[in-house]
Image (tube, coloured by chain):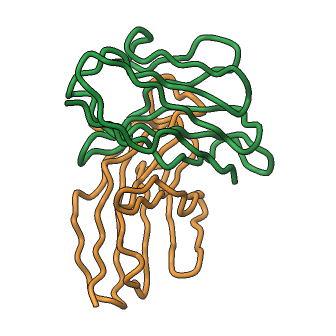
Amino acid sequence: SAVISQKPSRDICQRGTSLTIQCQVDSQVTMMFWYRQQPGQSLTLIATANQGSEATYESGFVIDKFPISRPNLTFSTLTVSNMSPEDSSIYLCSATGGAGGGTDTQYFGPGTRLTVL
Amino acid sequence: RKEVEQDPGPFNVPEGATVAFNCTYSNSASQSFFWYRQDCRKEPKLLMSVYSSGNEDGRFTAQLNRASQYISLLIRDSKLSDSATYLCVVNGAGSGGSNYKLTFGKGTLLTVNP
């Protein structure tokens, strides 16, 4: 299974600012994803991070609010832009398609706990 | 109908009890099915995949009924360490049946008491 790390693990931010979250996988993976988990809720997919091209966003999420980069097969970033208190959530990176793993088994990073004041 | 729907819970059971979780999914084109476990303030971790023939891993048994679009997880002889939220997860449950999109149920909280 892939080992995934995220930075920062948590942050407290002011309204109107932006935060970039980094996701690093210890091996090359086919697919990387970004999820949001709001308090007391389950995970919701924000977007699929595509290597070398624009991310594919799910309904309700847009690039201007959540720009995503994926410069290579092991790294991705998610930026939460112009934050408001409603963006307070846990943001999780996941990956699939690594060596020894199937393309439908996803492994998750530890998450970034974001609080917006 | 929600894409993936689980028992709302929470479940509180004594050690040694058998507990069953149920889940239904709406998209008949869904391709892969999983149970994930999420401990408090931790990320989800894959517990087991679910196959049409049913599969067992120690105390855990998962079943899939494609005709009824129903998934279950049975935990026998529950331990204190089984306390967690159990997430029913379906691959390809969303519109278009994307191969890689996971759709999560809201999860069912299990507390195993001494």
Q: Is residue A98 left or right of residue B100?
A: right
* Displayed quadrant of residue B7: bottom left
- Residue drawn 51% across the image and 75% down it: B60
Q: Look at chain B in the picture and name its colour.
A: orange
Which one is nearer the viewer's eye here, B72 or A97? A97
- Residue drawn 47% across the image and 18% down it: A57
Which one is nearer the viewer's eye here, B89 or A77? A77
- Residue drawn 57% across the image and 41% down it: B31
Question: The N terminus of chain B appears in which quarter of the rendering?
Answer: top left
Q: Look at chain A in the picture and name its colour.
A: green
Q: Is residue A55 left or right of residue A72?
A: left
* Displayed quadrant of residue A59: top left
- Residue drawn 72% across the image and 45% down it: A26
Q: Is residue B47 left or right of residue B95?
A: right
User: Does residue B64 sit above or below A58 in this rendering?
Assistant: below
Residue A2, given in percent of the width and then of the height, sits at 68, 49
Q: Is residue A108 left or right of residue B21?
A: right
